[in-house]
Amino acid sequence: MSLWNPTELRELADAYVAGSLDAEKLQRLQEVLLAEEQARVFFLGYVDVHAGLQWKAQRGELDVAWLAEEAKKTDGVGGAVAAVGATSHWWRRGRVLPVVTSLAAAVLVVLGVLRWITPVGPEVGSGEAPALLTVSESLHGSLLDGEALQIGRQFSAGPLELRSGLVEFRTASGTILLLQGPARFEILDGLRGRLYSGNLVVRMPKGRSGFVVETPKMRVTDLGTEFGVAVADGGESQVQVYEGEVRAESTITGGEKRLKAGQAMRSEKGGGLVEDAASPNSFVRRFPPPAFPTEPGGTLFNTSVVEVVQVAVASTPVVIDGDLSEWTPAKPFQSACAPPYHASYFVEGRMMYDANNLYLAAHVGDPDPMCNRAGGIMDFAGGSVIVRVSTDRNLGWPLKGSQLDAHNKKAPPLPDSVSQRVTSLILSYDKSAEQPRLRLQHGFIFTPSAGPRPPEGWKGQFRMDTDGRGYTLEYAIPWRLLNCAEDPPRAGDSMAALWMVHWSDANGRVCRGQLVDVTSPQSQARGISPTHFFLHGPTWGRAEYLPVR
């Protein structure tokens, strides 16, 4: 029996992104995600789209036809999730990668997972009625049936449901409506619309006013302004003013209040209006530029330049304190995001070993360092370094396994795909607990190392840069946690490895971008997005274990 329902999960996802989950709801979200693979697909798709839209992502293209064919090769959602990695991006030839490709959303299109959404009405814009809305921009915008919204598409009066993406509509009067999916919206006439669920930003032309947004519990009238309206699945509504002024009225109690720029208000369950805390990140207010932005911040991706990381022998005892002065034997590799972000977003990674431990260290450039407040299986999203390694010399290099193979129920998986000596080490700083943490997963099925309990015996430390724009991490992980205590890597071994760095927003909850490096030189020929290299062993680079010097 299913442990989740779409309405509940959407509300939990909304609260997660907004940072308003309490301990009980966070626990419930973790239970749902751990128990149901379809729930994980929906949640990851939701966060993927939200993070990309909030973070000025650029356009991406997904070969959905290829994805459908790959999904046919396996049973269930897991295979299709692995298949989403095969987006074609020329990433080693110097072109910038898009942050968002709505991969999880595309999986849902192929598998029909979101058929629980109830249409609010027939498709509009096909009759003789005058057009009231015209699509002026679309970033992965799609309707309920999966149809992509094209620029120039017109809609007459009536309802529409946006399943995913961000769509900018322009009314005949020049009003801009920015609708962020998933959302249900109905345009009533040239100056009036009804929002059933989702987020909507209204921006009036200068000198104009009067656009009205109705919700189940609130009516918001523009008085010459820019404002955002959000409606949860339960009908609770929120309005936030960015410029000018609005009038907010309760459709339940009849109460009325005026709001100015910087103010926000929400409806209570009974329909009353109460002041709310304004949040600059609650709504996407501008459509992302079609090309890579030139201002600081924005899309973070790199072109992989590292194929091999050298793992030096720790010649002296390693003290895990965030001070890397004893790491002189380890030559660091360096990788950075594309200009102009390279000076602020980068990593210098190092690896060492001895008879007892694998040692990992990194200096990470990060304008919002050590603020991770994400939890559960999404803990990486709040800022993290993930090092993926094979410690089984019998598997050699390159690895042959993948998540697609691991979930293939029609044939036995390759040993690489399910090996408990292929491990992902998720390293992050838990801001809430003010301490480092480590989470381990094994194989391409990503089984936990010790069930729900964290591993024991490791040591870790973080140290923030003096200027507050980066951090250093240092870890010692016993070989037994990597399931190779009896036969750990030794000098001369060359085994697979992959490094990933994730950056978050200032709240430490939503992933803003990532860097992927230490990769196979043949990766570009595989047509797989680097963001999904972790699912495909053949794309991993090498870790070379050096002898004592």
Image (cartoon, rainbow, N blue to C red):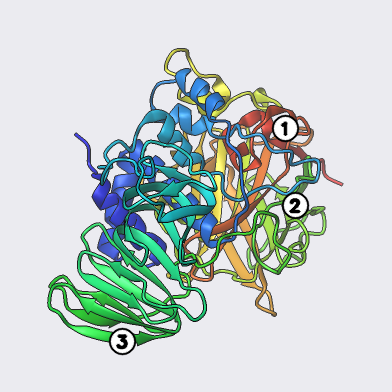
Give the alpha-carbon distance from disc 2 to disc 1, as whole Å.
Answer: 31 Å
Q: Is residue 35 visible?
A: yes
What's the residue type where badge 1 is placed?
Answer: Ser
Relative vertical location of residue 203 with respect to residue 165 in this rendering, above or below = below
Label 3 close to label 2 by CB (< 8 Å): no
Give the mark nearest the N terminus, 2 or 1: 2
The x and y percentages for residue 357 are 63, 48
Give the alpha-carbon distance from disc 3 to disc 2, as whole Å.
Answer: 66 Å
Give the alpha-carbon distance from disc 3 to disc 1, as whole Å.
Answer: 57 Å
Q: Secondary structure at mark 3?
A: strand
The x and y percentages for residue 243 are 47, 81
- Which of the 4 image quadrants contains residue 401? top right
Instruction: Say which residue label 3 marks.
Output: 258
Crowd tier of the residue under label 1, counting other residues whose Cα lies within 10 Å: few below 14, some 14–19, many 20 or above: many
Q: Secondary structure at mark 2?
A: loop
Q: Which mark is residue 523?
A: 1
Looking at the image, which residue is at 68% across and 39% down?
A: 497
Crowd tier of the residue under label 3, counting other residues whose Cα lies within 10 Å: few below 14, some 14–19, many 20 or above: some
Instruction: Say which residue label 2 marks.
Output: 314
Relative vertical location of residue 226 with respect to residue 540 in this rendering, above or below = below
3 or 2: mark nearer the eye: 3
- Where, quadrant-wise, is the N terminus in this rendering? top left
Question: In the visual, does 252 lie left or right of 392?
Answer: left
